[in-house]
């Protein structure tokens, strides 16, 4: 048995060495992108495409000891709209691989998911404009994909009155059936307006599919005008399922509920926004996720650049996250992956006093690629943390915590007069470049006990700021500082005297170094 394990380990290392050998093929493209980066906006420890622009992440999965990330690549001459591909052992350090799935017979390879079986990985995606496609790979690095039947397994309906629409799919298996949902809309909202839809199909062989019905039941949490693009349907918690998806109106969303296997329906019990505000200009975009099999899931999202600096494309992925749900069916989010391996030049501070409304600079904490952990005293109420700040306050990004400032939730029996706390990222002054117009502030609510200490985990990477609060909630925005000295950190107690009990900060290495 020991010999078998040793051989398997050597094979995995050989596979990964092959992937590393492919890396030089992409170094020139990455170098070219860096030369276009006029204002130093290109992140160094968040995944970026080696060449040109990229869009939705697709089919995040774990296969034969490696994590695989696929993503939409477009505006690449002579290659068409296809899936890019990268591999990682720790979800942080990524190695570029050749593109995975290319168009034909479809004109463009759009978004989709993967489903991992014991001996193969199944990818499903929307092949624009003809329908849902399925491809299968079983090699160690998922480089050799074969399209089932060489044509759509579910064709886009030609009849406008068809009971379903075809767009981004998600696939899983229950018993003898494979199931597929196709995210889109249905005109069943107020006055016939569009609301999100997930159309359900099933098959025993991946080739022949029958339409079942609309999959969502009791969805009172989506907005009129949202759609159900880029769906990922995953088991979560003890007996719940999670549907995370993307709305072209309001960004990334989630729905939690019970999966009624007998009636093949998803009965929704809670839901909310992963992104706050309209799509674009640096908010959270589309998700990709993979279940860990223990009630938890790993997720990653892409985010768009502002593109106000012509010729620079700085789309990037967020850091990976671990998702679960609490006893109120609320999504719980914390950072995941071996991000600690990127840390260097550690700075530690203790008991930093924060007098009421007196701005406190932290001169030893400074940088454009950093991680900062801050633990405040129990009574901390409203706090502002400015990052990527220049000394003259020409530009800065403000992170604001407000205890108990959210909406009262009386939706459950018995009522609840407690108010959730709020985390906000305000990009209003993030850039001093003339003509810059910021995105709306990112505002997220989360449950917090009255005297619970505040813990902020802040990740800063040139043009992206991610904040995790008490290992429970997450907020992210892209920001666009243009001054070389916009590297400072300042903290202000907004309501009363407060104190930073403990602070740890690190500079962060690049993931492609």
Image (tube, rainbow, N blue to C red):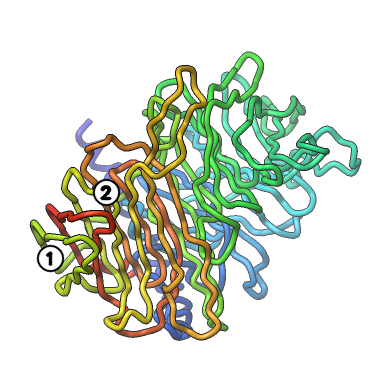
Q: Position of residue 9 (x, y in %)?
A: 27, 45
Quarter of the N terminus within the rendering? top left
Q: Position of residue 130 (x, y in %)?
A: 79, 49
Element carrying mark 2: loop
Choose mark 1 or mark 2, whichever is in front. Answer: 2
Question: At 31% from the left edge and 67% from the top edge, which residue is drawn?
Answer: 386
Neighbour tally class for label 2: few under 14, some 14-19, many 20 plus, Cα within 10 Å: many
Question: At 91% from the left edge and 41% from the top edge, which residue is drawn?
Answer: 159
Q: Is residue 335 visible?
A: no
Report the number of discs.
2
Q: CA distance from mark 1 to mark 2?
A: 25 Å
Closest to the observer, 413 or 495: 495
Q: Is residue 343 left or right of residue 100?
A: left
Question: At 28% from the left edge and 44% from the top edge, which residue is drawn?
Answer: 470
Whichever of callouts 1 and 2 sits on the residue coming sooner in the sequence is: 1
Q: Position of residue 509 (x, y in %)?
A: 26, 68
Q: Are marks 1 and 2 in contact (CB under 8 Å)?
A: no
Neighbour tally class for label 1: few under 14, some 14-19, many 20 plus, Cα within 10 Å: some
**Is 341 located above or below residue 194 in the figure?**
below
Point out which mark residue 347 bears: 1
Residue position marked by numbered label 2 in the rendering:
381
Q: Is residue 144 left or right of residue 223?
A: left
Element carrying mark 1: strand
Closest to the observer, 146 or 215: 215
Question: At 17% from the left edge and 66% from the top edge, which residue is drawn?
Answer: 344
């Amino acid at each position: 048995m020991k010999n078998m394990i040793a051989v398997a380990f050597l094979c995995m290392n050989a596979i990964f060495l092959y992937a590393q050998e492919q890396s030089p093929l992409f170094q020139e493209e990455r170098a070219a992108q860096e030369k276009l980066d006029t204002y130093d906006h290109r992140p160094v420890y968040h995944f970026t495409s080696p060449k040109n622009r990229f869009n939705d992440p697709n089919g995040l999965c774990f296969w034969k000891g490696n994590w695989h990330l696929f993503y939409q690549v477009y505006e690449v001459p002579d290659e068409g709209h296809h899936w890019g591909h990268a591999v990682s052992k720790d979800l942080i350090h990524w190695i570029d691989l050749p593109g995975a799935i290319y168009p034909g017979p479809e004109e463009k390879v759009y978004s989709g998911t993967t489903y991992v079986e014991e001996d193969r990985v199944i990818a499903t995606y929307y092949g624009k404009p003809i329908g849902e496609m399925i491809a299968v790979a079983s090699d160690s690095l998922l480089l050799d994909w074969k399209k089932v039947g060489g044509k759509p397994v579910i064709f886009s309906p030609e009849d406008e009155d068809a009971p379903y629409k075809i767009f981004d799919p998600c696939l899983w298996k229950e018993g003898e059936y494979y199931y597929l949902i196709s995210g889109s809309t249905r005109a069943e909202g107020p006055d016939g307006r569009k609301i999100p839809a997930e159309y359900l199909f099933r098959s025993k062989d991946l080739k022949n599919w029958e339409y079942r019905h609309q999959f969502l039941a009791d969805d009172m949490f989506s907005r009129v005008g949202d759609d159900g693009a880029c769906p990922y349907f995953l088991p979560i918690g003890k007996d719940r399922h999670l549907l995370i998806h993307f709305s072209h109106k309001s960004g990334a969303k989630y729905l939690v509920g019970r999966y009624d296997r007998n009636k093949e329906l998803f009965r929704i019990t809670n839901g909310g926004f992963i992104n706050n505000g309209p799509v674009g200009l640096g908010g959270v975009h589309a998700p990709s996720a993979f279940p860990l099999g223990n009630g938890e899931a790993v997720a990653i999202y892409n985010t768009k650049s502002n593109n106000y600096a012509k010729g620079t494309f700085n789309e990037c992925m967020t850091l990976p996250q671990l998702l679960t749900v609490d006893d109120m069916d609320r999504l719980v989010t914390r950072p995941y992956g071996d991000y600690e391996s990127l840390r260097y030049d550690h700075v530690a501070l203790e008991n930093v006093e924060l007098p009421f409304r007196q701005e406190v600079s932290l001169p030893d904490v400074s940088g454009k690629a950093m991680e900062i952990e801050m633990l405040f005293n129990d009574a901390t109420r409203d706090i502002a943390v400015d990052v990527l700040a220049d000394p003259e306050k020409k530009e800065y990004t403000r992170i604001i915590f407000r205890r108990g400032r959210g909406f009262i939730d009386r939706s459950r029996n018995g009522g609840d007069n407690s108010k959730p706390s709020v985390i906000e990222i305000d990009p209003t002054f993030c850039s001093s470049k003339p003509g810059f117009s910021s995105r709306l502030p990112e505002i997220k609510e989360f449950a917090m006990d009255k005297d619970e200490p505040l813990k902020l985990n802040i990740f800063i990477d040139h043009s992206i700021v991610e904040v995790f609060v008490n290992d429970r909630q997450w907020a992210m925005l892209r920001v666009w500082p243009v001054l070389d000295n916009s590297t400072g950190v300042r903290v202000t107690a907004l309501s009363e005297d407060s104190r930073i009990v403990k602070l740890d900060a690190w500079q962060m290495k690049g993931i492609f170094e």
